[in-house]
Amino acid sequence: MIALVVLSVGMLGIAALHGQSLAAGRSAQLRTQAVNLAGDMADRIRVNRLGGAAYEGAAENHECDPQSGGDVDCTPAQMAAHDLFVWQAQLTRLLPDGAGSVTHQATDPPTYTIDVSWTEPNAGAQIHRLVIQVPEF
């Protein structure tokens, strides 16, 4: 009887540990997605260095990429708005309550702050911030 009680307590402990590991795995997956999405926007900014302050503006689908069959001769500002449009669509698809923003500071070299936020179950609102400096050339 005592062995059965000890075994039962041990099994409950293993079940609780398994539940915590599942939650930690989900949290790690969401954080990895957030880091990757912030890095994606940083890469987009590095490619479109002349976009500058337009990355703080509104997201808009200008169809600036060949995949959409759109115009590949967009201005840097149009490309920045399109980058934001594509990026925000990824945020909402890959993260629960995913949102993101970019701020631009006209320093030398220009500084961009990329914020990715999401909501984790049982942990609440989370944010990942990436600050990069991108010389204009």
Image (spheres, rainbow, N blue to C red):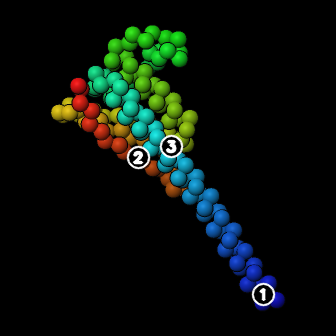
Label 2 SS: strand
Residue sitting at the far right: 1
Circles 1 and 3 in contact, beta carbons < 8 Å: no
Residue sitting at the far bottom: 2
Q: Could you tell which of marks 3 and 2 lies nearer the N-terminus?
A: 3
Q: Residues within 10 Å of mark 3 (few under 14, many from 20)?
A: some
Q: Is residue 9 left or right of residue 96?
A: right
Label 1 SS: helix
Residue occupying the point 47% across, 17% down: 65
Q: Amino acid at mark 1?
A: Ala
Q: Residues within 10 Å of mark 1 (few under 14, many from 20)?
A: few
Residue occupying the point 35% across, 29% down: 45
Which percent across, then down, holds residue 93? 56, 35
C-alpha distance separating marks 2 and 1: 48 Å
Q: Which mark is residue 3?
A: 1
C-alpha distance separating marks 3 and 2: 10 Å
Circles 3 and 2 in contact, beta carbons < 8 Å: no
Q: Amino acid at mark 3?
A: Gln
In which quadrant is the C terminus drawn? top left
Residue sitting at the far left: 108
Count of numbered tags: 3
Q: Could you tell which of marks 2 and 1 lies nearer the N-terminus?
A: 1
Q: Is residue 19 visible?
A: yes
Q: Return the residue at label 2.
A: 128
Q: Return the residue at label 3.
A: 33
